[in-house]
Structure formats: structure tokens, C-alpha cells
Image (spheres, rainbow, N blue to C red):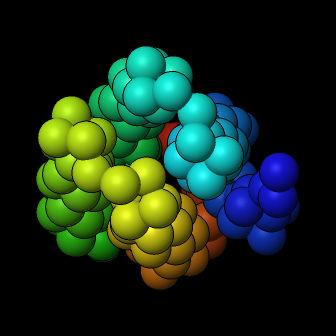
Amino acid sequence: MPRTWTDSLKIGIPLLDLQHQQLLDEMDRLLEGLKTKKSSREIKSILKLLDGYVAVHFRYEEGCMNNYQCPVGCDNQKAHQNFVQMLTQIKSEIENHQKFDLVADQVQRNLLDWFVNHIRRIDKQLEPLVKLSKPIAS
Ligand SMILES: [Fe+2]
């Protein structure tokens, strides 16, 4: 199974980087599960796990953006809301027995590609702030 995570996505906050790895790995697993036509029970259990990871991660990352007074904090929150909507949409398609091939395309574009692009464009703006300063709270 090809891995989407690459070290070039690191930001320099160890827990945040670990969460990004776990999220991308879980989305890779979801994509693989859809492509290899796993049971919808298995797909649903991956989605449930992903849901939990996403909630914990977004909360933590939004806190980091606050602590470092990152100027894209608001954009980050809005983007996270969009991602949650996309995830909700994918969950409902699975519930409604949409064809796995079609859902796989969406997972690739709207979850995996979206997330990598989001890390590079928005989350990465934390990197210089982490290098320059110490966090106000850890
Ligand atoms: Fe983010």
C-alpha cells in the first residue's frame, strides 16, 4: 500500500506531526479498503476511527495555532470545517451504498489530496513560528 505521508510534511511539533502521519495512514487504509472491496462493515470501522482522530487532531492543532499566534488560524478553522463536511458526505455515501469505486475517487481527491495540500499551504505556516519561538503553553 503506497504511503501518502512524507517527512517533507513535518512542521516541527512532534505530536502534531505524529497526528498528521496517523491521519494520512488511516486515509490510505480507507482508500485501500475501498479499492480492494473490503466489507462495508470494515470501511465503516475505519471511518469511525478516522472521525475520532480528526476531532482530536483539529482541536489540538487549532490550539497550537492560537499558542503561536499564527496569522492563518481563522483560515485553518474554516478549512477544518470543510474537511469535516467532506468526511460526513463520504460517510453518508457509504451508508447509502454508493459504489466503492466512486467513493474511492472522492477519498483520493477530497480527503487525501486535500489534506496534503492543506498541510503544505496552511499548517506549514506554523513551522517558522515553532523554529523562532517557544510555545506559550505546551
Ligand atoms: Fe490544519
* Residue 61 sits above or below residue 124 on the image: above
| Rendered view: 44 above or below 114 | above
Residue in view at x 17 percent, y 40 percent? 96
In this rendering, the answer to whether 68 lies above or below 21 is below
Q: Position of residue 135 (x, y in %)?
A: 52, 42
Residue 119 is at least partly visible in this image: no
Residue 101 % position (x, y) = 47, 62
Number of marks in picture: 0
From where the camera sits, is residue 138 visible?
Answer: yes
At 38% from the left edge and 65% from the top edge, which residue is drawn? 102
Left/right of residue 9 with respect to residue 69 in the rendered view: right
The residue under the point 30% across, 71% down is: 72
Q: Position of residue 26 (x, y in %)?
A: 60, 38
Q: Is residue 72 left or right of residue 119?
A: left
Q: Residue at x 66, y 46 (%)?
A: 36
Instruction: Examine the rendered structure and indicate whether residue 43 appears above or below residue 104.
Output: above
Residue 54, image x, y percentages: 39, 36
Closer to the camera in the image, 14 or 135:
14
Residue 50, image quadrant? top left
